[in-house]
Amino acid sequence: DLTRPEDVNLLKQRMEKRIEGKSHIKNYERIIVRKDGTELQAEMSTTTTLWQGKMRPMAIIRDITERKLAEDTLRESEERYRILATNTQDTIWMADLEFNLTYINGAIFNFLGYTAEEITCLKLADFTPPAGRQMIQNAVEQLLANYNQGKSSQVTIELQHYRKDRTIIDAEITANLL
């Protein structure tokens, strides 16, 4: 039998609904037990078909164990990244090619003096003096040129930013294309 004891009743109910022509879940995931007792994650696609004069259940079973392991690994990696980005004292931000901020971590609020609501409305140009904007533009062009040549790279530049009160602070930016 491929079914874990705790799943037997639920699967019987689903099969009865299929045979009776009632509405039922046609695609779902479940655990299947192999002959050796090990378990695998499976994706089930079920229907009924006429066979030997009777409506019979039919299922396609796909082993998705590796996919589920990959999803779990990705979820754990994303959680570690989120913890790191949230708790670091360094500012982390991402911007699109029009320099709209697409991600900011909490450290930027202390660094620039803006609230979360205020900074989400800003573009990079709003807190970067013209000379710094040009340096960022040049860095992006360099990164894009390297990318178009099949090279991955990062660029580090020193520039200045405006704080909310318009005082100027020094900053170092290490930029990568994502």
Image: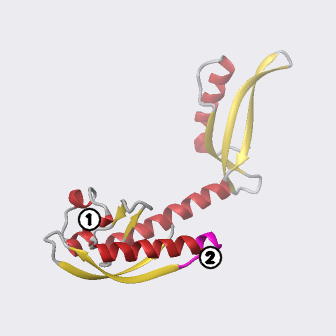
- Magenta: main secondary structure: loop
Q: Residue at x 54, y 70 (%)?
A: 144
Categorize mark 2 by other alpha carbons within 10 Å: few (<14), some (14-19), many (20+).
few
Q: Amino acid at mark 2?
A: Lys
122 relative to 55, above or below: below
Write down the residue under mark 1: 126
Magenta stretch bounds: 147-153
Q: How many marks?
A: 2
Measured as percent of width and height from the top left, residue 109 is found at 23, 69
Q: Position of residue 51 (x, y in %)?
A: 83, 21
Q: Looking at the image, which residue is at 30% across and 73% down?
A: 130
Q: Amino acid at mark 1?
A: Asp
Camera-side residue of 167 and 73: 167
**Residue projecting furthest to the right:** 52
* Kind of element beneath mark 2: loop
Q: Is residue 48 left or right of residue 111?
A: right
Q: Quadrant of the N terminus?
A: top right
Residue 67: horizontal and vertical position, in percent? 64, 56
Camera-side residue of 86 and 7: 86
Q: Is residue 141 left or right of residue 129?
A: right
Above or below for 162 versus 74: below
The residue that label 2 is drawn on is 151
The answer to which quarter of the image holds residue 6 is top right
Instruction: Please name the residue shown 22% across and 56% down the image.
Output: 117
Horizontal and vertical percent position of residue 148: 62, 69
* For marks 2 and 1 on the same chain, the one whose residue lies earlier in the sequence: 1
Q: At numbered mark 1, what does the secondary structure look like: helix, strand or loop?
A: helix
Residue 150 magenta: yes
Q: Nearer the viewer, residue 148 or 63?
A: 148
Q: Residue furthest top?
A: 53
